[in-house]
Image: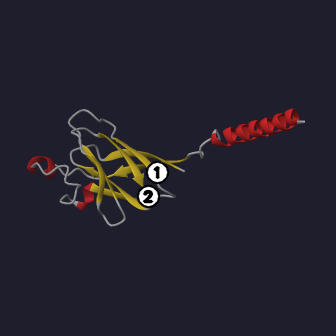
């Protein structure tokens, strides 16, 4: 009789362990992805390059040389943005900035070419993608991928 009780108790403990293990190994929440792209048109403003003020989030640039793209994000996540102009290496220069809903700087890419990339984590709410044409072709393509839970 004691042997049956011990076997039943052992089987019950084993069943609970298996149930607990399957709960612990449950798949994590699936990530959601949202993508988009658009074309930017802006005239170049080479005064930023000439004065050495390039990379100042394009606050002191001719407004005709800036494109602000407002986005409302569906949650908190990672935002990857890429800007490419038709000729990204031959003395062309665009800059790319990410601002929060209050216009505060989140991230920037202000290299010396017309290929710029931003990877920002923990981004949420309303953001603005700011593209600035310093010495580039008049158009550029911006693509973005937002990954969240």
**Outermost residue to the right:** 1
**Outermost residue to the bottom:** 102
At x 14% / y 47%, what residue is drawn? 49
Alpha-carbon span between mark 1 and mark 2? 7 Å
At x 75% / y 36%, what residue is drawn? 14
Residue 18 lies in what quarter of the image? top right
Q: Residues within 10 Å of mark 1 (few under 14, many from 20)?
A: some
Count the labels in the image: 2
At x 26% / y 33%, what residue is drawn? 89
Q: Is residue 96 left or right of residue 15?
A: left
- Observer-nearest residue: 104 or 93? 104
**Outermost residue to the left:** 51
Q: Secondary structure at mark 2?
A: loop
Q: Position of residue 1 (x, y in %)?
A: 90, 36
Q: Position of residue 56 (x, y in %)?
A: 19, 54
Q: Secondary structure at mark 1?
A: strand
Q: Is residue 72 left or right of residue 20?
A: left
Residue marked by disc 1? 77
Residue 91 lies in what quarter of the image? top left
Q: Earlier in the sequence, mark 1 or mark 2?
A: 1
- Observer-nearest residue: 43 or 74? 74
At x 23% / y 50%, what residue is drawn? 44
Q: Residues within 10 Å of mark 2 (few under 14, many from 20)?
A: some
Q: Position of residue 80 (x, y in %)?
A: 41, 45
Q: Position of residue 107 (x, y in %)?
A: 30, 50
Numbered badge on residue 124 = 2
Tags 1 and 2 touching, CB below 8 Å: yes
In this rendering, the answer to whether 104 lies above or below 148 is below
């Amino acid at each position: 009789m004691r042997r049956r009780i011990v076997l039943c108790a052992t089987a019950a403990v084993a069943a609970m362990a298996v149930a607990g293990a399957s709960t612990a190994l449950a798949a994590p929440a699936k990530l959601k992805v949202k993508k988009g792209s658009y074309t930017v048109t802006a005239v170049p403003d080479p005064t930023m390059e000439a004065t050495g003020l390039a990379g100042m989030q394009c606050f002191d640039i001719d407004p005709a040389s800036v494109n602000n793209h407002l986005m409302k994000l569906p949650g908190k996540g990672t935002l990857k943005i890429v800007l490419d102009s038709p000729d990204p290496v031959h003395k062309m220069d665009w800059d790319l900035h990410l601002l929060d809903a209050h216009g505060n700087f989140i991230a920037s890419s202000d290299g010396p070419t017309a290929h710029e990339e931003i990877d920002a984590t923990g981004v949420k709410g309303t953001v603005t993608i700011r593209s600035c044409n310093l010495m580039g072709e008049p158009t550029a393509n911006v693509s973005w991928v937002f990954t969240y839970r």
